[in-house]
């Protein structure tokens, strides 16, 4: 186990650079036993403990001025159980490594988000999700987990063992303990055919229910200052495999979506008046395409342009009205928005603090280029989202507190009562958790 006293090099920053922390010490345990010792030592010293992943959250959910746990040595697949259709992995395993390893074994997760840089525990604990008619967030694919609690002991949790903890800890915000291992449901690897094409915004909103119902995975991106969207449908396919061509894939996914987009955002940040014209051009540059590949190569894409993001889940039926209100707000304001608005869906699930807990949900994500003032846009968007009983993504920018969240989560009190039982001294607490869960 390596321990680092906090000096200048001990400042932790998230991916977007909007959150920093200066822990008293950093610990990189090489085993669950070493992690347990670090938790017990923190208790002796009266310090809080937080585990960090790759810092892809935009909130301070993982920030601490106590002991910072880095999980990069707690990685790898522990067990593949083909009969049960599960794989158990160490909590610090990056999703991209899990996806590649599963594909090598002829296996796959059923659904995933659009980036795969996060650790498995960071992604599940904050409710990371993709889009799906029938399949939900990454956490909803969990069959079991191990949770280290405040006394350094490990609870094994599933629908059969400690089911109340399992219901909450799948999306536990780091508030209940430190996840040490996760067991995912997996299935034999399959092919997805992706169909991407432009569509007018009014048409997407008018046909949204049909588009969602007819496709296993439907999402779209609306370009503010335009009436244009890019839609994406992903459906299972019998093949054959027809991946994106190397040259065309590089041109669209790297050159246009990353390199050109980065330059466009630099220009837009320096001269905001150019953004509507850039948005119009951007919406026309991405052409229609269809390709077939294994899941992680269809669901995920590289994101090299850094940004800040707010995302809310609203009831599925509220999507058209909510998005029209967002468009009207932007149109009548002086805001200049260079990033598209992303819309995805998820079915209701049974996880206590899932953004889809107990209701079919649609996600609306707004972004701003890093270094650009974002508060006015996010504040106005949040006002619209909360008017529709929106639930903020736990890892993305929002201003909601426990009083609001208790109103939109029917099982909120169930979670906080469990937290009181598992961590009465708030060993795993921090300022963010005090705001969203209460003292």
Image (cartoon, helix red, strand yellow):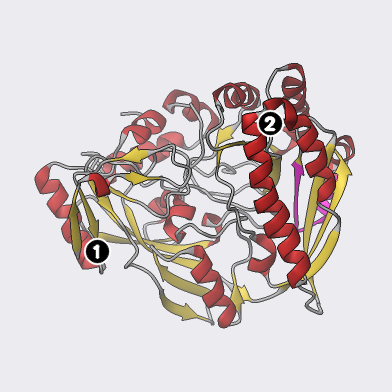
Whether residue 363 is visible, yes or no, is no
CA neighbours of label 2 inside 10 A, class few (<14), some (14 to 19), many (20+): many
219 drawn magenta:
yes
For the residues labelled 2 and 1, the Cα–Cα distance comes to 43 Å
Q: Left or right of 51: which side holds 38?
A: left
Q: Is residue 100 above or below residue 290?
A: below
Which residue is rendered at x = 56% and y = 28% of the image?
374
Query: In front: 57, or 183?
Result: 57
Image quarter where the C terminus lies is top left
* Residue 255 image point, x, y percent: 70, 57
Q: Which residue is mark 2?
A: 337
Tell which tag, 2 or 1, sits nearer the viewer: 2
As for residue 352 lying within the magenta part, the answer is no
Image x and y of residue 274, in percent: 74, 30
**Earlier along the polypeptide chain: callout 2 or callout 1?**
1
Q: Residue at x 32, y 32 (%)?
A: 431
| Residue 402 versus residue 365 in the image, above or below | above
- The residue under label 1 is 29
Q: Which residues are magenta?
A: 210-221
Asked whether 177 or 267 is in front, the reply is 267
Rendering coords of residue 433 (x, y %): 36, 35
């Amino acid at each position: 186990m390596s321990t680092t006293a906090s000096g200048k090099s001990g400042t932790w920053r998230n991916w977007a650079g909007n959150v920093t922390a200066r822990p008293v010490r950093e610990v990189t345990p090489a085993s669950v036993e070493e992690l347990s010792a670090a938790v017990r030592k923190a208790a002796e010293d009266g310090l809080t403990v937080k585990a960090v992943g790759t810092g892809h959250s935009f909130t301070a959910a993982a920030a601490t001025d106590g002991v910072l746990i880095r999980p990069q040595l707690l990685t790898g697949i522990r067990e593949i159980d083909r009969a049960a259709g599960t794989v158990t992995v160490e909590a610090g395993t990056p999703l991209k490594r899990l996806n590649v390893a599963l594909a090598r074994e002829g296996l796959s997760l059923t659904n995933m988000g659009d980036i795969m840089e996060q650790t498995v525990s960071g992604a599940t604990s904050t409710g990371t999700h993709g889009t799906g008619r029938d399949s939900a967030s990454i956490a909803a694919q969990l069959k079991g987990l191990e949770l280290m609690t405040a006394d350094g002991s490990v609870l094994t949790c599933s629908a059969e063992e400690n089911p109340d903890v399992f219901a909450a800890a799948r999306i536990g915000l780091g508030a209940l303990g430190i996840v040490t291992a996760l067991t995912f449901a997996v299935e034999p690897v399959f092919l997805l055919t992706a169909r991407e094409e432009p569509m007018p915004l009014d048409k997407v909103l008018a046909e949204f229910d049909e588009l969602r119902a007819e496709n296993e995975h439907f999402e779209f991106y609306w370009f503010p200052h335009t009436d244009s969207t890019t839609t994406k449908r992903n459906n299972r396919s019998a093949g054959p495999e027809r991946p994106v061509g190397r040259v065309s894939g590089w041109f669209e996914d790297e050159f246009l979506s990353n390199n050109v987009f980065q330059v466009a955002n630099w220009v837009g940040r320096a001269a905001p008046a150019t953004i509507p014209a850039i948005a119009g051009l951007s919406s026309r540059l991405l052409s229609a395409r269809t390709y077939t590949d294994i899941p992680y190569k269809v669901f995920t894409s590289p994101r090299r342009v850094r940004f800040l993001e707010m995302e809310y889940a609203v009831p599925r039926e509220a999507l058209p009205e909510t998005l029209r209100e967002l468009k009207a707000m932007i149109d009548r304001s002086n805001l200049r928005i260079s990033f598209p608005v992303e819309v995805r869906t998820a079915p209701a699930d049974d996880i206590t603090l899932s953004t889809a807990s107990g209701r079919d949900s649609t996600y609306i994500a707004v972004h701003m280029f890093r270094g650009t003032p974002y508060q006015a846009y996010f504040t106005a968007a949040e006002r619209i989202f909360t008017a529709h009983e929106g639930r903020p993504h736990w890892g993305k920018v929002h201003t909601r507190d426990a009083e609001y969240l208790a109103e939109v989560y029917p099982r909120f009190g169930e979670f906080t009562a469990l937290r009181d039982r598992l961590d009465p001294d708030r060993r795993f607490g921090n300022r963010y958790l005090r705001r969203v869960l209460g003292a």
